[in-house]
Image (cartoon, rainbow, N blue to C red):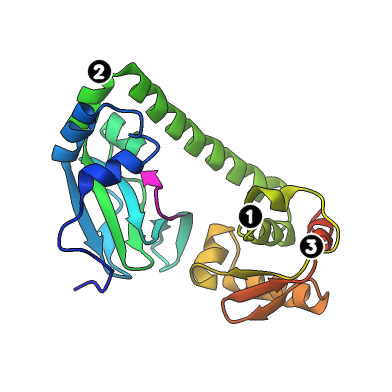
Amino acid sequence: MTNAPRTERTDVHTLLGRLPLFSELSTEHVTKIAESTREKRLSKGEMLFQKGDTPRGFFIIVFGQVKLAFPSTQGNEKVVEILGPKKSFGEAVMFIDRPYPVFAEALTDTLLLHVGKNAVRSLIESDASFALRMLAGMSMQLHSLIADVESYSLRSSTQRVIGYLIQHCPMGKECNAPMGTLETLEITLSTSKQVIASRLNLTPETLSRILHDLVEAQLIAVQGKKIKIPNLHRLQEFGL
């Protein structure tokens, strides 16, 4: 049984109303969606669905973390995405009535909301603005996928790792701006280095080597899952 924090009963209506996708809907529409929504709680390491399963809706993460990955007959896997709170997934395959092309596994104790397909289709037919928001969300996912392909094709292994670290620094979008000397930034890796390596299309050995090289260059310091960046500007320049 999961050890995830929980109340006796999740207020699905309130949770949906706080999500960007549903925030502009009328109370009546949110209520209808809530009626077709169910909770799904997963313990760390538990599978949500397997590749080839039939989708009956899509998922939204309330808290926790989910890995989407391709399985391999050799026992390896290719991590496609690591998703956290307020992220949704499964919309595209839901609409085209095709099996899941990946599997989904909880990386931590996780609470999801499963929104039924029929309710979504009904809402799209009655609310054009909702349809546009859902299309925008799927377009952003496609844009992210294209950016991944570009990264794997045009950027070196070291550039990918540096990009990942900068993306997860605690200063958000400001991290991408040119900066001078900063006080030390600290990143806590949200999952294992093996999962991160697969996400970056690297082997665990390559990721470890790159982190070691960055430590040797005094660009980062590594303590378990904590990575300290003494000067973000220097790290950015190193990745150019």
Residue 36 in sight in this render: no
Residue indicated by mark 3: 235
Q: Which residue is mark 1?
A: 167
Residue found 20% across the figure and 63% down from its top: 7
Which tag, 1 or 3, sits closer to the chain's start? 1
Point 37% across, 20% down: residue: 129
The circle on residue 73 is none
Residue 48 relative to residue 232: left or right = left
Assign the N terminus to one quadrant of the image: bottom left
Tell me residue 69's x, y (percent): 41, 56
Which element is circle 3 on?
helix
- Which numbered marker is on residue 125? 2
The percent coordinates of residue 213 (x first, y second) are 77, 74
What crowding class fits label 2: few (fewer than 14 Cα within 10 Å), some (14-19), or many (20 or more)? few
User: N-terminal of the two: label 1 or label 2?
Assistant: 2
In magenta, the rendered stretch is 83-89
Q: Position of residue 207 (x, y in %)?
A: 64, 70
Disc with the residue nearer the chain's start (2 vs 3): 2
